[in-house]
Amino acid sequence: MKQNSGLTLIELIITISIFIIASLGILGLFSYSFKTVGNSKAILTATGLAAKQIEIIRNMPYDKLGTTEGWPPGDIPSSQIINQNKINYTIQTIIEYVDDPYDSLFPDDTTGNDYKKAEVMVSWDKFFSINPVKLTTNVCAKGLEIPNGAGGLKINLFDNNGNPVSQASVKIENLALDPNIKINRETNNAGILQILDLPPSGENYHIIVSKEGYSQDYTIAPDSLGASTPLQPDLRVIEKELTEKTFSIDKISSLKISTLTKYCSSVPNISFNMRGQKLIGRDPDVFKYYQNLSTNSSGELIIDNLEFDTYNIALNSLAYDLAGANPLIPLILLPNTNQNFYFILKPHQAHTLLATVKDNSTGLVLSGAEVKLSKIGYEETLITGKGIWRQTDWQGGSGQENWEEEDMYFDDDGNINTNNSEEMKLAGGHTQQNFNETFDDAAYENFSATTADWNTTLKELRLPKIGTDFSSSATGESLKINSAAYTITKAYLNASHTLNGETINYYLSANGGIDWENVISGVEYIFINQGNDLRWKAELSTNTVSITPSIQSISINYTDSNPFANNGFLISSSYDTGTNKTIWGNLSWEPQNQAIELGESPIKFQIAANNDKATWNFKGPDGTEETFYTSPDASINPIHNNHQYIRYKILLSTENSSFSPIVSDITIDFTSGCSTPGQVFFSPLEETAYDLDISLAGYQGYFESINVSGNNSTKIFLNPNP
């Protein structure tokens, strides 16, 4: 029997895979070898270029040894690029004087330029070289040192902590000399740069020290600040002396400024000025940093490359008041930081008070202090370091998903009455209605009962005429003027009439004209016989047949009473703290005492919080959906912490349909990125004296009388208990 031999498909695939892997490895090795060989050739070329430059330097006259941007000056390029074999080589040359300590140092050694040191560095732009080729040589002058009457500069450079800053760029210019002096050098590892054999000159040596990623320090020409005197004038070089100057730079920082409401909503396009404390001139002061700035349409401004300093930031807005800041003003900006700063704003009011509470021994701000501001007819207590979401008006109605308008909310079940701007309650109960009759039509005239002239042409009710004489008396009566079938308890009739010396009597009936009750125009009347059919009647009479009294309009405000709904709920709009780093505090409401007829727990709350503004799972104090917050000032369950968005759900109920729970104020406090540490803001106020009372556990109480006029701010220092 004949058998066929060969590779199966699987064996073939495995063989090809092994071949590909091996080939890739070999190709990678070839690539690496190519780069290694190329880099080796580049090093050889760079070494040759450096050696050639050193040879040129050695063959030049000593007094000609200098660079185009260095000291001593000369014709050797400080930097040049040479292309060889399609590779760019950068040749950098530094030539400097060396003061040899063998014969003492300048200025004790009157000639500090003992010899010159030349350093040549060559780098290239291909392959993977990191370190350039570097060659150095020393060149001495022939003969003895001869004092030349020159001077020197010594630059010391430190950071904010007093550490030396090495490899920083030092630019030295003196344009008053001919030829001009232009030197670009770097500090050594000790943060020092010393330049010798400089020509003497007055305050003409301009110095700029800088480093990538660092701030900048510099000297200033004496006459460049107008009437101000520079604090760091350009340096002078004196014959046979070493002028020494210390500068300070450090890593730059970034500052993000946000303008927000107390509810963490952005406030766009807010202008402000920002000023550092560092001065560059005196008499008058000239600040190193002073800018007029503005946030963008998103209420943000990012300032990069900002120097470490203490900055004062002042609001320039007629529309808003500063209600707090985080961190406090002035802002201390440290080196190498990304700092956030929040302006907390409120709409401008004529009279306000911003109070900051601090520890008297440490100067640190204090959170949790109760600050009460009061006078006759006014009292308000705020807590430092806490944000507060407060709603006192729901009259704007439902349909608002996100908290923007302070009198609106998200949803209700139709059993909540929010028509009163000062409170919410169950639907039903007493409601105020209004009716106006102006006699421009006869829509509400009861034709069967009216004997007076309901004159729509003259737009008035008057006595009818019989021939040329007016009737001695007549009656005008309306049909039912109320639409709902609710019990009417009281009414207020106000008539505009012309008596002409005669008489008009007014009557109201709450039960459809069965019982007419005499009322006085302009005086509220409580019905003896209540009902759900409101009508009015007027009796006109005259003693002179040529004269008639007349009524031009009748306005009736009345109160009807409907049984309250048994229960109802309302869901708030979602409130945004601006950050998920939010710790929720307490839930409270007013009034805390309710009518006993309402039964047990007539007011109940649940809380929902999230970070997606979409998942609303309402929960009670134990973190489940089965429980409710029923007592004011309750701590919100910590499961809601670290959530940026929050809503409350309020449930009202009654066991007696004649009574409803009433809520006039709902408050949730929290700490978050929008909280202002140690600060509270009172607005609006009156221009008068207030009592300021502050208390905090562990500290002595504080009290003072403070006069408020305009936009005020004050700092209070509390003493710890002995």
Image: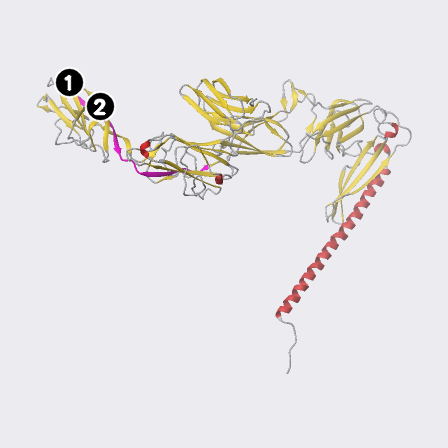
1 or 2: tag closer to the N-terminus? 2
Q: Secondary structure of the magenta portion, mostly?
A: strand
Q: Quadrant of residue 407?
A: top left
Q: Is residue 448 above or below residue 121?
A: above
**Residue farthest to the bottom, as pictured:** 1
| Amino acid type, residue under disc 2 in the picture | Ala
Task: Bin the neighbour count of mark 2 within 10 Å (Cα to Cα): few under 14, some 14-19, many 20 and up.
Answer: some
Quadrant the N terminus occupies: bottom right
Q: Give the spatial CA distance, label 1 vs label 2.
A: 15 Å
Q: Residue furthest right?
A: 143
Which x, y percent locates residue 301? 55, 33
Task: Please rate how many residues cluster around mark 1, counting C-alpha atoms within 10 Å: few if below 14, some from 14 to 19, many from 20.
Answer: some
Is residue 180 something one can see in this rendering?
A: no
The residue tagged 1 is 502
Q: Is residue 5 magenta?
A: no
Quadrant in the picture for residue 220: top right
At mark 2, the secondary structure is strand
Query: Toward the viewer: 41 or 569?
Result: 569
Badge 2 is on which residue? 495
Q: Is residue 468 left or right of residue 499?
A: left
Disc 1 element: loop
Residue extent of the magenta highlight: 550-575
User: Can residue 585 be seen by looking at this rendering?
Assistant: yes
Q: How many marks?
A: 2
